Amino acid sequence: FIFRAVACEVVDVASHRHGCRIVQRCIDASGGYDRALLVGAICRSCLTLVQDPFGNYVVQYILGLHDNQANSEIVRCMHGRLGVLSRQKFSSNVVEKCLELCMPAERIVMIRELADTRILGELL
């Protein structure tokens, strides 16, 4: 019941100063379907959450679970926006964590996007 309620309102809860810790504790305490529901909701909202002062910690927490499927979904959500996200204060931490923890093939795709001359010029 609680896990489903948090999953339905994940952006509002995870974007709150104390709510981000509650979401992380819910992930720890949940299992099976409830955990998949929470992780899925976070992954679907990750583009919003990575840019939030507190929500970015929740996305980084998901990345740290080493769930390849979740990590891939997070990388896919950010694809095409890495130049902008890597320059923002909060989302840049998530981009860095993705580069550190994602699968090698995804890392190559991310590096190619960041190394694109149109994006690279903005980063320098």
Image (cartoon, rainbow, N blue to C red):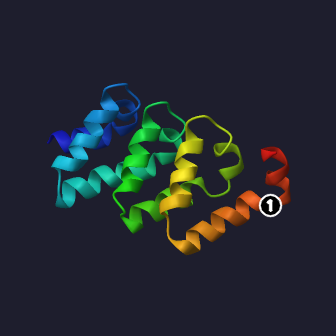
* Residue 43 located left or right of residue 113: left
Q: Which residue is mark 1?
A: 116
Whether residue 81 appears in this view of the structure is: no
Q: Relative to 51, does residue 68 appear above or below in the rendering?
A: below
Q: Position of residue 98 (x, y in %)?
A: 52, 57
Q: Position of residue 30 (x, y in %)?
A: 17, 51
The residue depicted at 40 percent of the width and 61 percent of the height is 70
Q: Image point 31% across, 30% down: which residue?
A: 19
Image point (59%, 67%), residue name: 107
How crowded is the residue under tag 1: few (<14 C-alpha within 10 Å), some, or many (20+)? few
Amino acid under label 1?
Answer: Asp
In this view, 56 is above or below 16:
below
- Rendered-image quadrant of the C terminus: top right
* Residue 113 in view in this figure: yes
Displayed quadrant of residue 54: top left
- Give me the residue at 64% from left, 70% from top: 108
Image quadrant where one finds the N terminus: top left
User: Splitting the image into 4 quarters, where does residue 88 fall?
Assistant: top right
Residue 89 in the image: state x and y as whole percent.
60, 34
In the image, is residue 20 above or below residue 117? Answer: above
